Image (cartoon, helix red, strand yellow):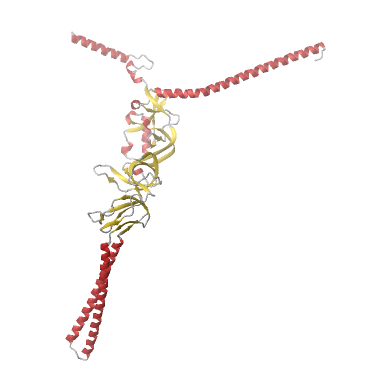
Amino acid sequence: MKAFLTLLVLGALAGGIFMLGGFRPGKDEKSLLHVAEDMPLTVRVAKPERRGIVKNVQAPGDVEAVLEVEISSEIVAKIEEMPIEEGDVVEKGQLLCRLNDDNLRAGVQSGEARVAQLNAAIMQAQADLDKAERDCKRQARLSEAEATTDKERFEYLTIFKKATAVLEMREQELVEAQAGLQRVKEDLKRTVIESPIAGVISKLNAKQGEVVVTGTMNNPGTVIMTISDLSQMQVRCRVDEVDIPQVKAGQRARVYLQSDQQVPVPARVVRVASKGTKTLGRDVVFFETLLEVLSNDPRIKPAMTANVDIEVAKCDNALVVPVEAIVHRMRKDLDEKIVKAFEAKQSQLDLSDRARHAQYIKVVYVMDGEVARVRLIEPGIADTRGVELSEGVAMEDEIIVGPYRSLDKLKDGKKVALSDEDKKKRAEMGEEAAPEAKLAAEDDDKGEEAGEDQTSEAVASEEEEASGSEGRSQAVATGAAP
């Protein structure tokens, strides 16, 4: 019995729903079950505006000096004197530090003594060579007179060749000694380190009394200090591979320092790396881009971190709509005319088949009375707030910009209604226009009153003229003077 009653109730419900679906009370012959679909969507609208729009590419970077020199020692020695401190301003050729030179001075004295010794040895070798040469000539004359033997003559000739070789050896030793002396003298000069550029001591690593070493293959050596020319600064930023095709040398840029995010510093793109760099441990590829800072702002210091905005595109008089108004719709959800218009535009471009047959198409919805109408658009430059449209909308159109839940449900011809906020704005605009209309009406009323006054005056004058003419006619008739 309970099962029978349950089936009876379910059947009654199904029959009622079927009857409601078939009942069409209105002239549009739509059933009551479709009433929810005809409820208007609450939307927000905005007018397109004419303004300048700039497309920026953002990238992080580091501030550095254009000209920066790391001062290192070319010899191993102890720092004897350092008359400068970190932050000091130095000129080109100014003394930075002086290294201990005792060993090098001793080396110079030793080298000079060696050179003098070899000069004396050369004089001795030259004397021996001259004697050997005279002996050989004498043996040659004796040999012609057959007063000596060949053996003696060859012995003197051998002595002559040995003397010649000794002289040449002493001369080569002298050259070597002179080169060694010159090397020691150059090392002695390197004990005095002077500034190669004019700038500021931006970093001081060593102190007086420390021993500095030279760099080798496995040891980079001691960096005594760093000098930076703060008159010319640059920013080395890292641009993502997605944005790098838009970045070119000469483009304007703005640098936002971490210390002051409100006031940007002007800059200009100088160079873009031709090869990308991959971050260690990540698959992100970036391209190193160099920017020249076009300001001598004292806030800029080397090694600061900054965010860079590079202007890659700009339009001074663009028709701009809010970025949230741009929606994507699948081909199958759009009217056939919209799809054909989109395909006609794509056929004129040199695109791949995949791009031409994209499933999603960018459109906007315009409020036309109480319904929404879809418009095919051609987007251009975009920033964080708006998108440039070269076609698809006009200045007088009301573009639907939200809310998102309504944009997601919008279709061409869908009923829409303004939000309370937009209605309030319209009412306020109407109130602002009302005083002007009131003034115009008052002017019209004054004009009408003035016209009535002029009419009454004209009527009175006509009556006076009429009465005067009657009096004159009576006087003529009685013979009285007018």
What percent of the width, then of the height, locates residue 99?
29, 58
Q: Using the rendered view, name the quadrant where residue 459 is placed.
A: top right
Residue 413 can be seen, yes or no: no
Q: Residue furthest left?
A: 151
Q: Residue furthest right?
A: 479
What percent of the width, then of the height, locates residue 91?
38, 55
Q: Is residue 361 left or right of residue 213?
A: right
Q: Is residue 428 above or below residue 316?
A: above
Q: How many marks?
A: 0
What percent of the width, then of the height, locates residue 97?
31, 56
Tell me which residue sits at (28%, 12%) in the image: 16
Q: Quadrant of the C terminus?
A: top right
Tell me which residue sits at (19%, 9%) in the image: 4
Residue 153 can be seen, yes or no: yes
Tell me which residue sits at (42%, 34%) in the image: 320
What percent of the width, then of the height, locates residue 290?
35, 47
Q: Using the rendered view, name the quadrant where residue 364 is placed.
A: top left
Q: Quadrant of the N terminus?
A: top left
Q: Using the rendered view, name the quadrant where residue 316 is placed.
A: top left
Q: Is residue 84 above or below residue 48?
A: below
Q: Is residue 130 above or below residue 280?
A: below
**Residue closest to the eye, 190 or 335:** 190
